[in-house]
Amino acid sequence: DAGVTQSPTHLIKTRGQQVTLRCSPKSGHDTVSWYQQALGQGPQFIFQYYEEEERQRGNFPDRFSGHQFPNYSSELNVNALLLGDSALYLCASSLWGAEAFFGQGTRLTVV
Amino acid sequence: GIQVEQSPPDLILQEGANSTLRCNFSDSVNNLQWFHQNPWGQLINLFYIPSGTKQNGRLSATTVATERYSLLYISSSQTTDSGVYFCAVDYSGGGADGLTFGKGTHLIIQP
């Protein structure tokens, strides 16, 4: 079992650009959640996808959007990047309402 | 929303010592998880423990849901135990809101 995999592992973007991060869930899991972790802080919930629909959303602007595909993999898109978007982005997968497992993260730097 | 407080924020111990990390939460929870974040950012699952006591080797955890706290015990610490320990809770039924994390306990085990 490959566990939760994220790509890319590192990314550098320029302010104002757009970025897409990808996540493949653990085998058998149907729910994917995304989190943002700033340096020295705990992860913050962005949104959660189940059955290809956004089910819940944290306190993040509309610049953050996502998608879940029929194979349960997911993408996180961020438009009009700001310097403050620099962070570690974590993907978690689970069965609906059950224990969550995290990927290794994508470290995004906005310059 | 729910508040999650972890204590202590920082802890420095000698190899072989025992430690207790605490997590207080402000409302009823459906799920509670403990994670260890390694230096590369990966969140490693330690316990999925909405209530009761569990043990895994040198680590054990207890959650008293009625009193809204959880404890993580680490015995005979090793340098590889160093890192940040997070408590995370899901207080909405059906796993709809993702996990709310505390700010973590930064543990340093000195040889």
Image (tube, rainbow, N blue to C red):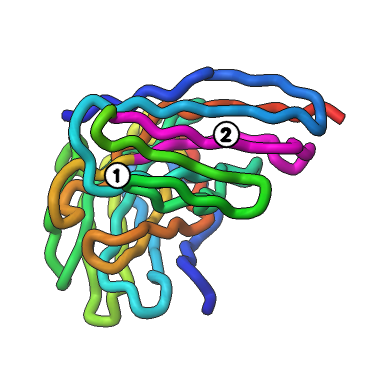
**Badge 1 sits on which subunit?**
B
**Amino acid on which disc 1 is placed:** Leu
Which contiguous range is marked in magenta? B68-88
Q: Quadrant of residue A55?
A: bottom left
**Relative to the observer, which residue lies in front, A90 or B27?**
B27
**Residue at 29% of width from left, 55% of height from top?**
A33
Q: Position of residue B15 (x, y in %)?
A: 81, 31
Above or below residue B85? Residue A29 is below
Residue annotated with mark 1: B99
- Residue position for label 2: B84
Where disc 1 sits, the SS reads loop
Q: Decide if residue A68 is in sight here.
A: yes
Q: Secondary structure at mark 2?
A: strand
| Residue A101, position as x, y percentages in the image | 43, 59
Residue A43 in the image: state x and y as whole percent. Answer: 39, 38
Mark 2 — on which chain does it sit? Answer: B
Q: CA distance from mark 2 to mark 1?
A: 17 Å
Q: Residue at x 22, y 65 (%)?
A: A96
Q: Going 57% across and 34% down the picture, which residue do you hit? A: B84
